[in-house]
Amino acid sequence: MAKPRLPPLAALAPYIERIDRARWYSNFGPLCDEFEARLAARFGLESVGVCTISNATVGLHLALKAAGAREGALCLLPSWTFSASVHAAVEAGLIPFFADVGADGLLTPAIAHEAIRSAPGEIGAVMPVAVCGQPIDPLPWDQFSKEYGLPVVLDAAPGFDGARPGQGPSVVSLHATKVLGVGEGGFVMSSDPDLVASVRRRANFGFLGTREAKVEATNGKLSEYAAALGLAGLDEWPDRRAAFQAVALRYRENLADVPGAALPEGWGQDWLSTTCVVRLEDPAATMPVLDALHAASVETRAWWGRGMHTHRAFADYPRLALPTTERLAQTVLGLPFYIDMTPEETDTVCSALREELVRCS
Ligand SMILES: Cc1ncc(COP(=O)(O)O)c(C=O)c1O
C-alpha cells in the first residue's frame, strides 16, 4: 500500500554533524528553529507562525486547548476521518459529536451551521478534517469562528502540500507515511503568533521563557534528529513532489476512461497527498472490485473504515444522521501509492480496476 522513503543518510549527514557539534538534541534547538523558519516561509508566515510538534495527534489536542475549546462541551467533527482526530478531541476534554460531510468528504461551514442547530449540548470547538489531504480554504472557517465565537481547529494532518494557514490553527502531520515525513512529527501553524506561542508553551511543560509551568501542558516537542530529517526533506522537496506527482498523474490518465471510478478533484494536479483513493459510483461494484484487485495481488485499504461512529471506542458519542459518510464508506477504496511506484505497477492496479468496472457496467 505504502512504501515510505525518508531522506537517505548522505542527505542527513550534514545536519547530524551539526547536532553532534552543538550537542543540542531537543527542546527547540537550532535545527528545530531553522525547520520552523523554513516551514513558515513556505506557508507565507512569520517564523513565529509555526510550532513543530511530536506528532499531529498531540498537535490537535494542544491546538484545541490553545484556541480556547471549552472543556466538557462538544467537539463537532466529521465521522469521516482517522481515529486520531477523535482521540485528540477527547484528550482536550471535549465530547466528540459526529457530523456528516459533503460528497467530497469534507465538513463545510453550512453542514456545521446545521449541526450546531441540532446539537444535543453546548459546542466547544469545531474540527474540519482534510481527510485525503485536500486543501481547505481557512477563510470561511475563520469567519465561522468569529460568527459563532467558537474555536475552529483544522485537521490538515495528511495535507502538507495543500495546507493553507488561516487565523485559526491548522495542524499538519509529518509521519513517515506523509508526503513530507520525519518518522513521527508534525507542526501547528497560524497567522496568530499568540496562538502559536500558546501551543509551544503547552508542548513544553507549560514553560515559555521561564521554568514555571503556567498552563496545563505536556511534552510534545520535536527532537533535533526529527528536525534534521525535516530539513533534508525540504531540501529535496521539489524532486520529491515531482516524483509523487508523476505517479499520481499516471493514475489519473489510466483511470480517466474507467466507468464509475473517480479520483478526488485536483489530486495529483493542484495538490498531492499519499492517500490515493478511488471513489466508485455504484456501491454494488465494491465487493467485485475488491475481489478483482485481490486476485491481481493488489492490496487495498479502507482508510477511514465505516466512519468513526462505528468504532467501539467512539460508538457512544452523539452523532447526527450520516448518510454521505455511510455511502463514502461503501464506495471509497484506498489504492497503493508510493514515491517510486513504477508505471507498470500503477498500470496493474488500474487494469484490474478497469476490467472489473467494465464488466459491472
Ligand atoms: C486526518 C488525520 N488526523 C490526524 C492524524 C494523526 O497524525 P499523526 O500520526 O502525526 O499523529 C492523521 C494521520 O494520518 C490523519 O490522517
Image (cartoon, helix red, strand yellow):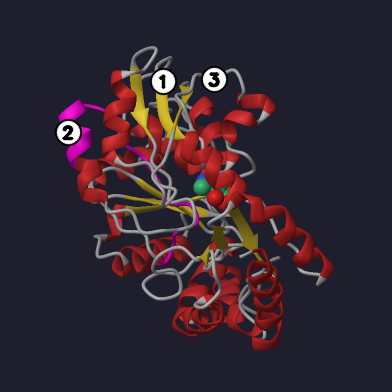
Residue nearer the viewer, 219 or 298: 298
Q: Which residue is mark 3?
A: 317
**Residue 9 appears in the picture as rendered:** no
Q: Earlier in the sequence, mark 1 or mark 2?
A: 1
Q: Which residue is mark 1?
A: 74
What amino acid is labelled 2 in the image?
Answer: Lys
User: Bounds of the magenta span?
Assistant: 143-161
The residue located at (81%, 72%) in the rendering is 296
Number of the front mark, 1 or 3? 3
**Image quarter hosting the C terminus:** bottom right
Q: Does residue 249 lie above or below 56 as drawn?
A: below
Res 4 → quadrant: bottom right
The residue located at (36%, 39%) in the rendering is 153
Q: Residue 234 at what x, y percent from top left?
A: 46, 75
Q: Does residue 358 lie above or below 196 as drawn?
A: below
**Residue 144 appears in the picture as rendered:** yes
Q: Disc 3 and disc 2: Cα gap in Å?
A: 26 Å
Q: Which residue is mark 2?
A: 146
- Of helix, strand and loop, which one carries label 1? strand
